[in-house]
Amino acid sequence: MLDHYITREVADNLRRPPGEGGSCLPNACYTDPAWLQLENQRLFARSWMYAGSLDNVPDPGDIFPTTVGNRPVILVHGHDGTIRAFHNVCRHRGAILVEHPCRLRRNMTCPYHAWSYGLDGALVQRPHFNGAGRHDRPAAGPGLVDIRLARFHRAIFINLDGQAEPFEDYIAPLARRLRRHDLGALRLAKTLTWEFRANWKLVFENYFDNYHVFAIHPRLDAFAPAEGRKGFGYENRLLHTEVTFDQPEPGRGVGLPYYPGLAPGLERFEAGYHLFPSCCYQIWPDQLTVFQVFPVAPDHTIEQLHVFLIGDAACDPEWEEARQGVYDMWDELNREDVNAIEWMQKGRQSPAFDGGVLSACWDSSHQHFARLVVETMT
């Protein structure tokens, strides 16, 4: 079925350099529901995906439901201190087990027939399973189906099919670039949410498009002019841009504590990283933001931006005004992008566009992203 979308011509164009006939994915990869279904099955399930952070399940007994690759999953902090991930579905009749985040639980009880499971996923009890009043406490039974999990400092990643590359290899390029930042000092301060009438890939492609900053983002362009920017580079499954800026401003380096022990020079360092296909990391001297997308339909995406700040600055009233400045900055920036992303989605309906005419200066990252999509799904 993949051949229906990725013809020999498309595959050849993905390999040609930008400026020499190279292009990106065809329109159908942004508009066809069958392609999104393939992405859920072959791309998201086969990859390491950002699922949440330790801040979502900080204490034993905490449970956090989310969706990854259109599949309901839960993150669970066990009373043995272990963080686990499970498919969020009861083994009896397939009801969702946990609908909302909850805290300090001893077990998980299905709302449909009250089957209960321990926080380790083991089946605990099946009330009335053998008839009225005849409860079943099996010594061994169909427990929850677990999911491969790994952590990067406070971030939690999962791999749905269990067959992705070792997590250490996947995360190594990012870990190396962020080795001088104390990511363990971060705490989740707030999650911001936007919706786009556009494909999830366009949300990410817009993120690692440094070319559009001068046209769409006047405040960001004044802060970090185009002369100091270039297209995103890439290393395996990491796309990256790194910039040194002159002076901080509210929302970007003013009013909040910096990373402890920050090395000289890093107080003027900002960088953006896309971890294919899962999320984007944006780092500043006083914050880290993680961009996560939830594809709803080929032309409908929910984006969440998780704002992490240093220690008590994430919640202490002393820094409330400065925190709000960060939230306002990110909200302004993302709202400026809504029209641009939706323009591109509308353009994917036109036969006059099918893969693009790429700039060798700015667009090689977009072509690399497209190749990664195809290679992972093949």
Image (cartoon, rainbow, N blue to C red):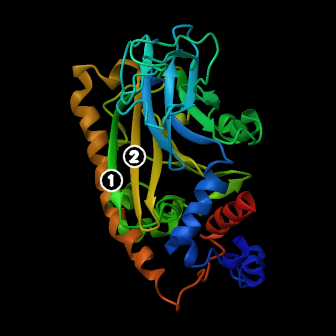
Where is residue 136 drawn, in percent x and y? 51, 13
Q: Is residue 58 visible?
A: no
Where is residue 162 drawn, in percent x and y? 71, 38
Where is residue 111 drawn, in percent x and y? 36, 28
For marks 1 and 2, the one nearer the N-term is 1
Determine the secondary structure under disc 2. strand
Determine the secondary structure under disc 1. strand
Residue occupying the point 58% across, 84% down: 354
State the image quarter where residue 133 is shown.
Answer: top left
- Extreme-bottom residue of the structure: 352
Task: Indicate whether 348 appears above or below 318.
Answer: below
In depth, the one of 312 and 193 nearer the eye is 193
Residue 194 is tagged as: 1
Q: Is residue 194 visible?
A: yes
What's the residue type where badge 1 is placed? Trp
Residue beneath disc 2: 304
